[in-house]
Amino acid sequence: MRNLWIFLSKYSAFFFFIIFFVCSVTMVVKNNSYQHATFINSSATVVGEAYARINGYKSYLNLKEKADLLAAENAALRQQLKTSFYYDSVTQRTVKDTLTKQQYTYIVARVVNNSVNQKDNFLTIDRGTRHGIGKDMGVVTANGVVGIIRNVNERYATISSLLNSETHVSATVAGTNAFGSLIWGIGNSDPTIAILQDIPNHIIVKPGQKVVTTSQSTLFPAGHPIGTVKRINRNSGGSFWDIEVKLSTNFATLEYVYVVNNLFAAEQKQLEAENNKVK
Amino acid sequence: MSRVILINMIRFMALLFFQVFLLKNMGYYNLATPFLYILFIMLLPFGIPNWLLFVLAFITGCTVDAFYDTAGVNAAACTVLAMVRVIFISITVQREGFDNEPEPNLAVMNFRWFFFYTFVLTIFHHTTLFLLETFNFDEIQYTITRILLSSAFTIVLILVYEFIFSTKKAR
C-alpha cells in the first residue's frame, strides 16, 4: 500500500494529466455538437466495419451448406438441360439397320457420390434398373474407362472404379495384341496411376503409348482409351512387364459417366456358362 | 506566499480579460489566433504542487472554454500544457538554488531558456487545441498551418508581455 502511494506520488503529474485530459476530452465530445457528431459517426464507421468483417468471417462457417445448396441447385438445373436427356432418348430409339447391328448402347448418368482416396474406391450414379442398368456393366467417359457396375437398385447404382483393388480390366497396349489386366491398389495408391500386368516382356512397349480396352471382355467396346504408358518396370523374376499407366480419366472431377450396355453380353455369357457346365 | 497568490490571481484576471475581450476578436483570417492566456499557467511558480498545477490549468481552460463556447477543448489543451510544463521543467531546471517561490519568467531565467520553454509549451498547447477543434485528420495541412501560425503569434505576444513586465522587475 505504501509502495503504491509512493508510486502514485512519484508519477502524480502523469496521473493528473490522465484524469484531467480524459475529463476534458469527454467534455469536448459530449458538449460540442460538431465533435459529438463526428465522434458518433466515426465510431459508427468503425463499428460498422467491424461488423462487416465479422460477417465476412462468419459466412465461411456455413460455406459448406451453401456450396451443397448451390451444387444441388446446379444439378437440378442441369437435369433440365437437354444434354441430361440426350442419351436416354438414344437408348429408346432403335435404329433398324440390317447391315450392322448395334451392340453397345450408352446410358448417361450423373455421379452423385465419389471417392478417390480410399483403399477401394466406389462411385454412385443416379441411374438404376429402371433406366436399364444391370450388374457388371462397364462405365466409361469420353476420355477413358471409369469402372464396373457393382450393385444396382431401382434408381441408383454403385460402380467399383478403376481405383479399386477388386476391379480388373482387360487392357492392351495399342498396336500390340498382347493383353494384360489393369489393376490398382497393390502398393500404389496414386489415383492417377494404375498398373498393367501380364504383358509379356518380349513385347516392345514405350512410354507414351496408349493403353486401351481389349475385345476380350464383354464390358467395354474394344479400343476405348484407358490411359498412356508412363513407365515400364521389369517384373523381377518373371517374364512380364509391370507397366505404370497414367489414367486418362480424372476420377477426382468425374461428373457425368456413360454406362455401357452390351446388348450381346447375355448371349456371350450364356454360351461361356455352358462351357463351364460341360466341364 | 500571499503575495504570490495575489499576483497570480491578478494575472489570471488580466490575461483572461485580455484574451476574451480583445484577442478573441483578433486574428489573421482564422489562420492565426493567439492564445495569450496560457502564459498564466506557464508563469505559475516552480514550487507549485502538481495537483494544484493541473487543477489551475483545468480551471483556466474551462473558463476560456466558457467564453469561446467550446466545452473542453481549451481545458484539454491546458492539461496537455501542464503535463509538458512538468516534464520540461523536470528535465531542464534543478530545483535547488532558488529562494522564495521563483517563477519561470525572463527575470529569473535567461532568454534562451525562456524562449525554448515558451516555444515547446505553445506548440503542444496549440497542437492539442486545434486538433481537438478540427477533430479529424482530413484537412491536416490546413490544421498544421493554423497551428504554426497561431503558435508564432502567441509566442510573439508572450515575449512582448515578458519584455514589458518581467525584465522591468529584474532591473
Image (cartoon, rainbow, N blue to C red):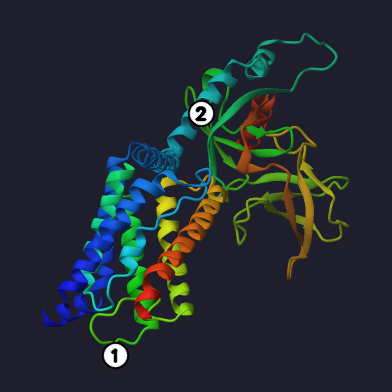
Judged by depth in the image, the label closer to the viewer, 1 or 2, is 1
Q: Are marks 1 and 2 in contact (CB under 8 Å)?
A: no
Indicate the chain on which mark 2 is placed: A
Task: Provide the residue designation for mark 1.
Answer: B96
Instruction: Name the residue nearer the viewer: A62 or B8.
Output: B8
Q: Which mark is residue A14?
A: none
At x 76% / y 64%, what residue is drawn?
A233
Mark count: 2
Instruction: Name the residue nearer the viewer: B161 or A116.
Output: B161
Q: Which residue is farthest bottom?
A: B97
Residue B115 appears left or right of B46: right
Q: Which mark is residue A70?
A: 2
Mark 1: which amino acid?
Glu
Instruction: Name the residue nearer the viewer: B160 or A157.
Output: B160
- Which quarter of the image is occupied by the C terminus of chain B? bottom left
Quick one: label 1, few (<14), some, or many (20+) residues within 10 Å? few
Indicate the chain on which mark 1 is placed: B
Q: CA distance from mark 1 to mark 2?
A: 81 Å
